[in-house]
């Protein structure tokens, strides 16, 4: 019996979180799981919050993840990781990009970006795996490959899934002309030590 696991992918519109959830869903289907993927996004094209739920197991009945149910939160932006902290299980983990994207209240000067978010989350007992995905994506050849760097890092927590299965999922989901760049970004994220 495969226990149902819940992954939330959170970020800001235009960062590639929807491609990441599609790739993860494809990978898990190929591995024999029942998978449900649900997208919840507001003003995603204007830099608004984007949330995707990926649930998998023997039999998954609902695509929605409630507060306190996420095994892993994959975050494309640090403040988004903090915003969805209440959805994480007590023993859950956050895998996050450390780059900050200022939300509108910060841009217009009505608020300031919170300082030391990684340390504050860790102080609450949260397991936080934080890395500078943008630098690694640029090293791979494109700032847009942050999503694959994050998935490479996430793959550490899927010990039962072989690396070639991830490669096949990239080949199946990513447009052909970007496959090698995305594989490189994935490999850089996977190789990075915590």
Image (cartoon, helix red, strand yellow):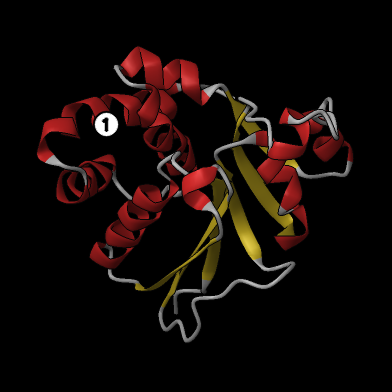
- Residue 159 x, y percent position in the rendering: 43, 47
The answer to whether one can see residue 160 in this image is: no
Q: Quadrant of residue 145?
A: top left
The quadrant of the picture occupied by the N terminus is bottom left
The answer to whether residue 88 is left or right of residue 51 is right
Left or right of 73: which side holds 82?
right
Location of residue 56 with respect to 113 vertically, above or below: below
Q: Which SS class for mark 1?
A: helix
Q: Tell me if residue 100 comes above or below residue 38 in the rendering.
A: above
Horizontal relation, residue 162 to residue 10: left or right: left
At which x and y percent is residue 189?
A: 43, 27
Q: Among all residues in the image, which is located at the extreme bottom?
A: 61
Q: Is residue 161 visible?
A: yes
On the image, numbered disc 1 is attached to which residue?
182
Residue 12 occupies quadrant: top right
Task: Measuring from the top left, give residue 194's x and y in whole percent.
Answer: 59, 25
Query: What residue lies at 67% left-to-right and 44% top-to-bottom?
Result: 80
């Amino acid at each position: 019996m495969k226990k149902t696991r819940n992954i939330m992918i959170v970020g800001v519109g235009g960062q590639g979180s929807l491609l990441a959830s599609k790739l993860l869903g494809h990978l898990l289907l190929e591995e024999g799981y029942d998978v449900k993927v649900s997208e919840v996004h507001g003003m995603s094209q204007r830099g608004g919050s984007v949330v995707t739920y990926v649930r998998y197991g023997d039999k998954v009945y609902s695509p929605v993840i409630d507060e306190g149910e996420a095994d892993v939160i994959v975050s494309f932006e640090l403040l988004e990781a903090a915003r969805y902290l209440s959805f994480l299980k007590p023993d859950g983990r956050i895998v996050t990009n450390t780059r900050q994207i200022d939300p509108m209240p910060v841009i217009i000067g009505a608020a300031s970006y919170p300082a030391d978010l990684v340390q504050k989350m860790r102080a609450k007992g949260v397991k936080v795996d934080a890395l500078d995905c943008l630098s690694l994506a640029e090293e791979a050849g494109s700032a847009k490959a942050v999503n694959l760097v994050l998935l490479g890092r996430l793959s550490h927590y899927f010990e039962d899934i072989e690396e070639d299965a991830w490669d096949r999922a990239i080949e199946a989901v990513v447009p052909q002309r970007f496959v090698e760049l995305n594989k490189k970004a994935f490999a850089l994220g996977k190789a990075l030590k915590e």
